[in-house]
Every structure is written in C-alpha cells, then in structure tokens.
Amino acid sequence: MSSSTLGKRTRQSTVTLTPGSRARSVSVSPSKRVCSPKKENVAPVTPTKNGRITNVFSAGKATVSLAKKPATPTLRTPTTPTVASPYTPIKTLFRRSAAPTALTARDTERDFLKKWIKERVEGGKSGSMYVSGPPGTGKSAVLSSICTEMKKEEEGVKVVELNCMALNRVEEVYTAIANAINPDAASTEDGLRKEFEKQACLVVLDEIDHLAEKEEVLYAIYSLPHHPKSRLLLVGIANALDLTDRVVPRLRAKGVEPELVQFRPYKAEEIKEIILAKLGSLKEESEGAGLGEVMQPAAVTLLAKKVAASTGDLRKALDLCRRAIELVESEAKRAPLLPTQDQQTGVKKVTVAHIARISASAFGTSTAQRLKTLNLQQKAVLCALCVSKSQTVGKLYESYTKLCKRDRMISPLGSSEFRDVVGSLEGCGVVNLGGAGVGGGGGNSPVKKGKGGDEDLRVGLGVPEVEVVVAVGDVGALKRFFD
C-alpha cells in the first residue's frame, strides 16, 4: 500500500453520529487527528456548542462520538416545617435521665452522709458505708449530689463514682478504681493501698448488690479501708433489701463491718411534693405559658397515693406521669379544645380519669404478681400474719418480732416502720385493716380503736394463705416461719 493511499484514508476516517441524523464523512487533516494512537482506549469528554456533552471514543483508527441528551433536572419536594409539640418539654421533664429538681424528703439521710464524709476527710481517717433501700428511693441521687459538692469543695480529695453492673470479678473492680484515680497506678490490691495512703479518696460503688453473690469480692473491697494509713472512704449502694441481713453479718464476722444507712420508700405526700416541684420548675422556664399546670392537683394526689401504696418508688411515679401526658397528647391530636384544656396554650390537662386509666394498667395485676413484687420485710409481715392468724396490729408486731429473732435471719423493724409496712400492704390489697380477711380466722366484730390507736386495729389477710406460701417458697429465711 502506497503512502498516498494511506493519507487519503486518514483524511476520511472520522465519523460523527448523532441521534436522528445520518452519518456523513468529514475530511480531517492528518495533523489534526482526534486521538493519539497511544491513547486509543481513553474516552475524553467533549462539550458541544449547544451545551450537550459528547462521549468520544476510538475504534481502531476511526473516532466515533455519541451525543447525550441533557440531564433532567431533579425536582425537590418542599418539606413541611415540623411543629414542635407543646407536650415535648413536659415529657422530657419526667424522663429518668432528667436531672432531679430537688432532693425532697431526703435531708436527714443526706446530712448524715455528708457529715460522715466531711469528718473523716478532715481527720485523715478511713471508713466504709453500706447504703441500702428499695429502688427509686433517692440513694444514687443523694450520693451523686454529695460527690458533685465534694469535687468543688475538697480539691485534695479524689472522688470516684462507679457502677458495678458491668463488673464481675474483684480484679475488674480494682482496675476500674485504679484507672479513675491514677491511670499509672497498678490495678492490684497493693497498688491501690499505696494510692489510698497518698491521698484521700471517696469511692462510691453503685449497684453493689450485683457483686453480693460472690462473698470474696465484697470482702476484698470492704477490707481496703481497714488497712493501716488508708484514707479511703468507701460507700456501697444496694437495692436489694435482704442484702443487709445476708451480707453485713458476714462482713462483721471478718472484721470489716461497714456503717449502715437505710433509705425508706417515699410517702404519698413526698411524691406529690416532688411532682409539683418539677411542674413548678417547668412553669418558671416557660414564663407563664401554662405548661406547669398540665396536671390537675387531684390527679397528682391520686397518682402519689397509688405509687406510695404499691412500692414508694419515685421513678415509677415519674414514669406514670410521663405515660399520662403521652395519653393526653394522643387524645389532644384527635379531639378539639375541652374544658380541661388550656385555651391559650392548647395543652390538654391530665385528669383523675387519666391517672385511673394508667394506674389500672400499671397496678392491675394478679395476686401472685402483686405478692412477688413485695420486698423482704413486707413478705415477712405477711408470713407472721399467716402463722398467727387475724389479730391486732400490736399483737402482729409482737409475733413478727418473735419470729425474726427466733431464726436470726431477718432484722426486725421498729414499731413505726412496721406500721408503715402494714399500711403499704393494705394499699396493695393483700391485707385488710378493720376486720378478718379471706385467709384469716377472725370474726366479723366491729373494730374499735383503743387507747393505743393503730395498735388495737384488727388486721387480716386479704389474699388466700396458700398464695402467700407459694410467693415465699424460694426464700429460705421466710419458709422457717412456718416450721
């Protein structure tokens, strides 16, 4: 093939194809080739005059370009602005993660713990404390507030707060404490002893009942403040009421007995005061917007009485408040303004009917379930009532105390605490005050309050005795009451 022939083919080797048009030959000068032979497989992007993008690729010695249609613009749907619900700040206020507005009805316990810590810090002494009580009684909140104050007031004191739910072995506890005090310290018992001799340390271990099943772990932890020259203040917090009777005697036998502080359940007036204080703080923040009056006073009173009669758990009361507000919110979305709804803010109020509806689902359980949720002392009183049958509150207290001291497994309550337990059992519907119940053997004689007041009040079982026996079947200390 001659060079002139090759030149002719080269000058007519470019073909342009566009949609809807015929292919035509275009003469191109050899010095203006579209693509280099060394870059045959590269697809450059070439803009056209009308703004369309053309892909150019080479096939052998022929260059073909395909024009694309312009891209269709994307249409965005306008978003509707979200309207904040007026109930959102109210629900947030009653969440468990919300900061407590005030530690109501816990001044006595708080003052005692603060004084105990202050005296030992100033005197350079060590010590250990065991704080117990039912869930939701303010134990963790009180200790947390004290720790916050200690961090501000005592610069020379190292404050450590740990939760034991994720800790199973004593080595894990040592490591967690060492990392919080000094990351360079050895996470061993000897390493911690040296750190506790250098500076005063306040260590608060929450949920310590998680470690109670392993006696050696608790003993190792509570033995730390008893070493010479130690400046450790150790405070353990437990929810299980029977730990005081099971754990403390063992620690006492080994010479590391801690001091005891017990938190009692909240009473109805205290729960009511706390709820109203929370609503009052919301009213101040909303600058008179009416959000602080979202619950009717009668509704708050009823809720407080329901919770106090059941468990006295403040967290339970706050959960019920939030659920009642959620119920009202769902109703407000479907119903127009009502007389119980604030005409200015559009916030529907929580009424007694709402609380009754929420309480029915929260507390309307079977007898077996109600007995199962009772604490150790409540079950002990029921067992004493089963053994001695129906009698007065004073006589029942004598029988209860005698049974507790006979087996030496449960520490008996004082007379005032005992009456509070009997009152809570009446609120749960498991005992009857004023006559014999279905499980008792007393008569139907009218009740007369004597000079002793509640001491002469007749008390009887409100549930079958067999239900009580079944409920305490897994508690060895209570089963001995029936021997």
Image: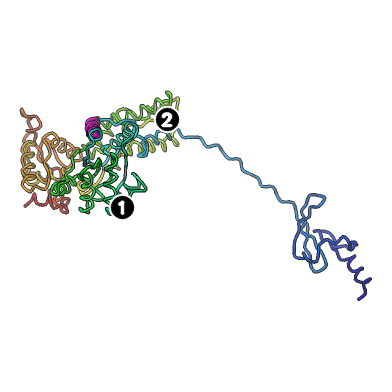
Q: Where is residue 239 in the image (x, y as percent from the top left)?
A: 24, 44
Depicted 294 relative to depicted 398: above or below: above
Residue reaching furthest to the top: 288
Q: Where is residue 445 in the image (x, y as percent from the top left)?
A: 6, 35
Q: Of the residues under marks 2 and 1, which one precedes in the sequence?
A: 1
Q: Which of 299 and 395 is in front in this view?
A: 395
Where residue 324 sits, quadrant-wise, is top left
Q: Which of 89 and 234 is in front in this view?
A: 234
Left/right of residue 352 with respect to residue 441 in the rendered view: right
Q: In front of the other: label 2 or label 1?
A: 1
Q: Which amino acid does label 1 sit on?
A: Glu
Where residue 162 sits, quadrant-wise, is top left
* Residue 107 lies in the magenta stretch: yes
Q: What element carries label 2?
A: loop
Left/right of residue 278 with respect to residue 312 in the rendered view: right
- Label number found at residue 347: 2
Q: Mark 1 points at which residue?
A: 172
Q: Position of residue 2 (x, y in %)?
A: 93, 74
- Label number found at residue 351: none
**Residue numbers of the magenta segment:** 106-119
Please tell me which residue is depicted at 29% across the width and 40% down the height of the picture.
Answer: 199
Secondary structure that dominates the magenta span: helix
Where residue 145 sits, quadrant-wise, is top left
Q: Is mark 1 on a helix, strand or loop?
A: helix
Instruction: Tell me the quadrant of the picture where the N terminus can be found.
Output: bottom right
Q: What residue type is labelled 2?
A: Val
Left/right of residue 356 with respect to residue 469 in the rendered view: right
